Image (cartoon, grey):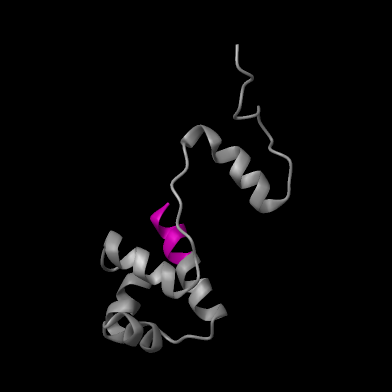
Amino acid sequence: MIKKIIQNLQIARKAKKLTQGGLGSKMGLPQSHISQIESGKIDLRLSSFFEMARLLDLEPMLIPRHLTPVVRSIISGEKPTNQPAWQPDD
């Protein structure tokens, strides 16, 4: 899961045409630190994650696990492959 998060941050960085050094400058970190984060050599601190996300115009969200299929289907535009995550009230 963390690998996918880091991959998404890297994709967003490249989409904004930012180098590792450019992102590092905005965060006050050396390019080598960004490189180590993206290669998985060092753990990404939560505070750094949120700062990177903000700089890359991403909005990190925590969603309840049972709603994950619904959120994924909305993002992908495909119908969920399993049962709906919601149930009508009794």
Q: Is residue 6 magenta?
A: yes
Q: Which residue is at 68% across, 38% downward?
A: 80
- What secondary structure do most residues of the magenta stretch adopt? helix
The x, y position of residue 82, in whole percent, is 66, 31
Q: Residue furthest front?
A: 89
Magenta span of residues: 1-7
Q: Nearer the viewer, residue 43 or 49?
A: 49
Give the side of residue 81 with respect to residue 13, left or right. Answer: right
Which quadrant does the C terminus fall into? top right
Residue 4 visible in rendering: yes
Q: Residue at x 42, y 59 (%)?
A: 3
Is 39 positioned to the left or the right of 75 in the image?
A: left
Quadrant hosting residue 33: bottom left
The residue furthest top is: 90
Left or right of 64? Residue 87 is right
* Picture layout, residue 57 above or below residue 17: above
Residue 40 in view? no
User: Which residue is depicted at the point 46% across and 68% down?
Assistant: 9
Give the x, y percent position of residue 45: 26, 62
Query: Between 65 and 43, which is closer to the camera in this rendering?
Result: 65
- Please state the horizontal and vertical placement of residue 22, each as a whole percent of the image: 39, 88
Q: Position of residue 31 (x, y in %)?
A: 31, 85
Residue visible at 65% across and 29% down in the picture: 84
